[in-house]
Amino acid sequence: MKNPSFFTSTMIRCGVIMFTLAVLISCKDSQTGDGQLPGQQVRSWDEERAQREQQQATYIKDTTIKRIETDGETRTPWYSNQLGYEWFKAYPLAFNGVPFVLLRAVIEVYPDIWEGEGSLGKLGFGPHPDDYDPESGKLLPPEQRHPLPYGFFTVPDTDVPEDSRTDNVFFSCSACHTGRVYVKDRVRHFIGAPNSEIDAQAYAKLLYQTGKKLIKVNSDPSKIEVNSDEVAKIATFLQSKVEADPTWFYGGKTPEQRLANAERAKIQVARILSRMEDAAQILISSAKKTELMYLALASKLMYTDKNGQKAPDVFGPRPGRMDAFGIAAGLVALHAKRDSFFARLPDDHPFFAGLENLSKEERIKQAGERLFKTAAEWMPHDPGASDIKSLWFSRDHGFANWDSNQAPEARVLASGVSSVGDPSKVNVRIHEAMNPFINDLPPAPYPFTVDLNLAAKGKPLFEQQCASACHFSQNKKVYKVGTDMNRATQITPTARLGLLELTREACELYVEKEDGSDWCLPKRGSRAADDEAYFITPRGDESGYKADVLHGIWAQAPYLHNGSVPTLWHLFRPAERPAKFIRGNIRYDEEKVGFIWDKAPALDEYGPGDTVHFAEHDTTLRGNSNAGHTYGSEWNDDQVRAVIEYMKTL
């Protein structure tokens, strides 16, 4: 494999961008009132929900070719909602990744690390929607399911010869934004909702531990040696498995599919066996990068106890949350060692300040050394994990991310770059379709009962004190409302420059290679102005969090930017917010509106063989505070219940 740096990606973020496979909800709940929703005739919630479900289904199936903002006047239109959905759902963000058959093997060879087959599901990566029988709602037999959980897909690295390409595992947009909710004894999937279970940083830990297994103990730290015995163990497993049961690798729903996939497995295993030590180096390289970013930098700078307050573990667990920008800052330190990164920068770039009189070669060398050696000064010093956001009607959001630190035109590509880690391996093409897809993606309706009479009573209070005050379309302000500020202040000026240049590099490499659309290059008239599109200049003392329009707010529990408040009831009743609660449950608390928070799910909670991943959220840890946003605490209980009932309909 070329350039195994690929998997820095997995360690950083899943991404961070975009999201979620649809399973339409056909349940027929009863409703308890005949109130009126804004702009609608009097109807039951069953009717309203069915119409909204159909609206989303029609949207994602629409094959109409339409012109989008990045097409320009002369380009032939090519985008359709259906294409955007397919790229969102099943196209990996990167061309690199762990070879599929190698990942399958190490999960089995190292049960002490991976806990055996299905362990990816135990990290919040759930089954595919079509792995469930449509009649019973139960999971199909294992051999008929996808070999990887939903959100993981394979793509070959096109930079290697065709006869040696491997299927490499990486995330699609849907991994982080496929919401699962247990409704009427069935697991339902919601396109565009946050994945409240996914634990990307814990996945990084497993890959790190696996890579460390493959390093020869007591080898010279300056020269990493491969542990041949461990590599042989993996090779033996691959060889025996492909001979005894080749269908195990890829599976297939029909005999014909299983037969074809068995042949595919034989080819893929043969390619890995022909260069086992190179394959092992992929995991070793990943482990070394993780060791630098997570352990040498993040855990020593950010994930430390401070002022008597304990820090969370750098690897988690943290279902549905990730320290995306904090860990991503470590990418800049990694790429400081790469001369080609600096070679693309203009001579007057801030990274070259004070080095102007040196030759270009020496200037690049010293700039890289300086950036790496000063990482402790410019990297974040506080953990700032935050919840994955929903994508519904993204057109209404003035800027991207919790703190509005990116302009709309750069939001998806920047997220992809920080997920992938290697600018040369980002699947830039698919990101062009993501902006138009999420801009108009309708939200999934609340799948349970709604008292429309009560909702009608809550509507005026919500509109007067919530929607008109802060939560309105295109609100570009950020606010300080007493919530934990770690996430808002994470990105320093130096980290911002590094991350935006990595994003620019990914775009420039794509334009040079494809000789096609330059959609990913902001066109604001100057490099400095374009920088503001990629990443807005840190606000310092003016930092805060934005107030989005609350489309589908029911699915975005737990609440606040760091997911520290389990339900809407607790949001409006600060004194009742629990100091500790369970995250990762997909059963729903219909009374308080949020996921079940006061007990952990049982191992068979969602049916035999389904995934269960949960963890305790401790609000006393650094970055986890549940303080702030006390709006509505002055309302009486009846008013709170009415407002919450209305918020179910958003």
Image: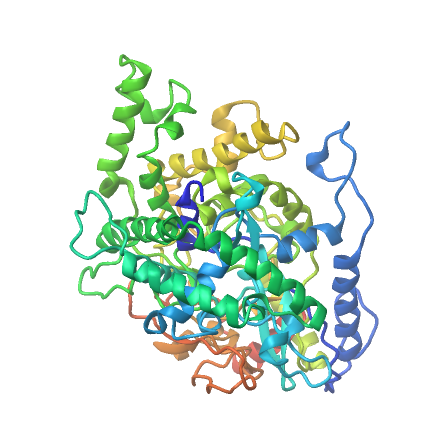
Where residue 640 sits: x, y (%)? 55, 77
- Asked whether the viewer can see residue 268, the reply is yes
Image point 47% across, 72% down: which residue?
Answer: 571
Image quarter of residue 565 = bottom left
The quadrant of the picture occupied by the N terminus is top left
Image point 69% across, 55% down: which residue?
Answer: 85
Front-most of 403 and 362?
Answer: 362
**Residue 192 as seen in the image, left or right of residue 334:** right
Where residue 25 sits: x, y (%)? 72, 75
Front-most of 554 and 137?
Answer: 137
Front-most of 637 and 495?
Answer: 495
**Residue 288 as seen in the image, left or right of residue 398:** left
Where residue 126 sits: x, y (%)? 54, 71
- Asked whether the viewer can see residue 387, the reply is no
Image point 77% across, 28% down: which residue?
Answer: 73
**Residue 517 as seen in the image, left or right of residue 224:** right
Vertical placement of residue 369 versus 295, above or below: above
Vertical placement of residue 95 versus 314, above or below: above
The quadrant of the picture occupied by the C terminus is bottom right
**Residue 542 as seen in the image, left or right of residue 612:** left
Where residue 186 sits: x, y (%)? 64, 82
